[in-house]
Image (cartoon, coloured by chain):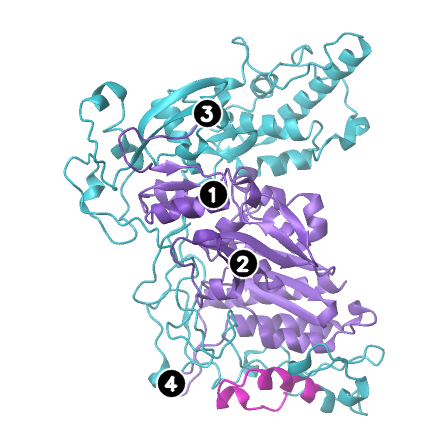
Chain colours: A purple, B cyan
Amino acid sequence: MTTHAPQATTQAAVLPGSLDEAVAALAAMPAAVPVAGGTDLMAQVNAGGLRPAALIGLGRISEIRGWQYQDGNALLGAGLTHARIGRPDFAALIPGLAAAARAAGPPQIRNAATLGGNIASGAPAGDTLPVLAALEATLIIAGPGGARREVPVSHLLAGMEMLAPGELIGFVRVPLLHAPQVFLKATGRTGPGRAMASVALVLDPARRGVRCAVGAIAPMPLRPLEAEQWVASLIDWDGNRGALVPEAVHAFGEYVAAACVPDPDPAPDGTQQQLPPAVLHLRRTVAVLARRALGRALS
Amino acid sequence: MTNEYPGPDGWEPVPQGEYDSDATAFVQLPPEGFPDAAPLEAPGHGYVPPPITVSPATGAAATDPAATGVWVLPENLVGPGAGASGGGVESVAADPVEQAPHHGQTGQWSVPLAEGELPDESGEFTASVVAGQQWGGHTPPATLPGGAAAPWAQPEVQEPSVDRPEQPTEPAPQGSAPDPAASRPSAGLELPDPAPEVEADGAPEEPEDEAPAHPPLHDNHPLASYVLRVNGADRPVTDAWIGESLLYVLRERLGLAGAKDGCSQGECGACNVQVDGRLVASCLVPAATTAGSEVRTVEGLATDGRPSDVQRALAGCGAVQCGFCVPGMAMTAHDLLEGNPNPTALETRQALCGNLCRCSGYRGVVDAVRQVADERRAAADAATEAPSAEGGAEERLIPRQAGPLATEGIQNPQDFQDGGQA
């Protein structure tokens, strides 16, 4: 069952059974790479880009493979697979995250890839990341000695806070908003593929807010905060949310696109530089995705 | 799980799979941080939304950013001339500007453009407030104009991936490493070395592996021994590099060449196997982490030398042309039919979306799945009609006893519709 390296003092691959064991193993082997689903890690290993000194498999930690309710929030284990997140019971809970998980890849990827791995790898095209950013999720990070600390997911994705040595993402706390959530992404092919751009949009009726995040166009998801507040001020939160005029929805898309894909600075002589065609295409894509996302969320 | 570190230009697109930042447009954020921007805040600030007249029935919400939850009565916002472009819009549109008063530039309120202006005209972006930005990954680092602080102010220049300290610190390769790539111990990412399989099979096989027996295994090539349970049999794997994928171990160490190595990225599905009942791409599973798990490969589908019903149907429906993708297809079809005994054509295609076939297409596979579903249901019906105990013993490893290619059995699947989703 367990792996054993015959002569080595430390095992090169361990499969801890609990989160604290994993943290302890990580503390014992600082150079080890924690691996949950391995879909990002092994793609690099196969490409020769990474040579792990040791592996700490997180797949046996049952405590992080489920979720539970926690006073208005959902406490998601970092080991939840995308396939599990995409199931209907979960979609009733956090529809935006479920939609992102379903769109994340083919079944053989979704069966293995985990939520925590998606956060930890922080790939720009990670599909759950804009949803988590829009939901303003909080990470619960397990540290040595049973320590737990909480970090907003935006801080981790933005690089403001990092995982300290020996820390693992244990849980993700996501607020339950009970409102429409939309995730849309544009890919280069039919079927699941890497997102060229993705937009996650959640409504927060309790706080009268619209929260939006655009993924895959930058190293981290981007929040068009001004556009969110602008459109939130136009929505009739007490009445029919869908009564927002189409011009406002359209302008929201443009607003988001302009915020996330801004114009270049003018040249030294003052002439306005033109964006490259690919970037203009990206801006249009973001605008369309944001417009559709808002329209669907309000409809 | 990535271990990249920010390059000299801040974050660089990590070499994840085939990702190429030049292939798609990619917003490069400036390396300088800007502490008072909210994390993940979008860089652009110049957009002036067009005047949106809140419909009289709708009313406007509060625009005070400090109190987003406060409901302000509509008359505070929408001026008496609600139909015009004036007051209500200004208060609305001024909101984001004052919310993020990073710079004087962004704070400047520019008059909303005329109504006739299309909202998507680029002229609406005041050029002064959107400062230098790097685009598309074509131009290397972010060059900020004249040292002026970028108004978008992203502190998040570091790579977003978690800065894991467990970066494999690789000591200098100590001689006997059989891999050629070991001569280049870079700090983070190794240079692409052709194939990990190549370097791995220098050390592997048991007889010669006893001879070297380098006990102080340097970190560059850590080995592990474990026991895989493949198709119901325990298969020991000794001294395998921990970075070997399950696909590699199955093919090269255990001799199970059914799973194919198509892309090594999980895109093609040719390497699909089941690990603990879940369909996974074996090329993306570290074999060391599957120790003790139940692995089922395409070789395990057949019973007593007879191909499984899915395999027979695949052959019968003409789904096989060159055959490279078919083992993965068979595993996917098995996995689909275990969870959903009566998939629709759409569900079948969605399940097969991760299996790429480059020569014969997918229609034959869809037909085969349909046929197997019909066969199994016919067999189940027959089993329930006959009062034998056979029905309860329906295990997935037991091929259904319906006659092969019973295509015209039962074609109405609706009576079994709710069986899926399990």
x, y percent for residue A164: 40, 59
Q: Please give the chain letter of the residue carrying mark 1.
A: A
Residue ID for mark 2: A139
Q: What stretch is highlighted in magenta?
A: B89-112
Indicate the secondary structure of the residue bearing disc 4.
loop
Say which quarter of the image contains residue A298. bottom right
Q: Please name the amino acid that badge 4 sits on.
A: Ala
Name the mark nearer the viewer: 3 or 1.
1
Identify the residue at the far right of this view. B57
Q: How far apart are marks 2 and 4 (CA)?
A: 35 Å
Q: How far apart are marks 4 and 3 (CA)?
A: 60 Å
Q: Please tell me which of labels 1 and 2 falls first in the chain.
A: 1
Indicate the secondary structure of the residue bearing disc 2.
strand
Q: Looking at the picture, does residue B189 appear above or below residue A278?
A: above
Q: Please tell me which of labels 4 and 3 falls first in the chain.
A: 4
Residue ID for mark 3: B322
Q: Are marks 2 and 3 on the same chain?
A: no
For the C terminus of chain B, the image quarter is top right
Residue ID for mark 1: A36
Image position of B139 (left or right of A146): left
x, y percent for residue A9: 28, 36
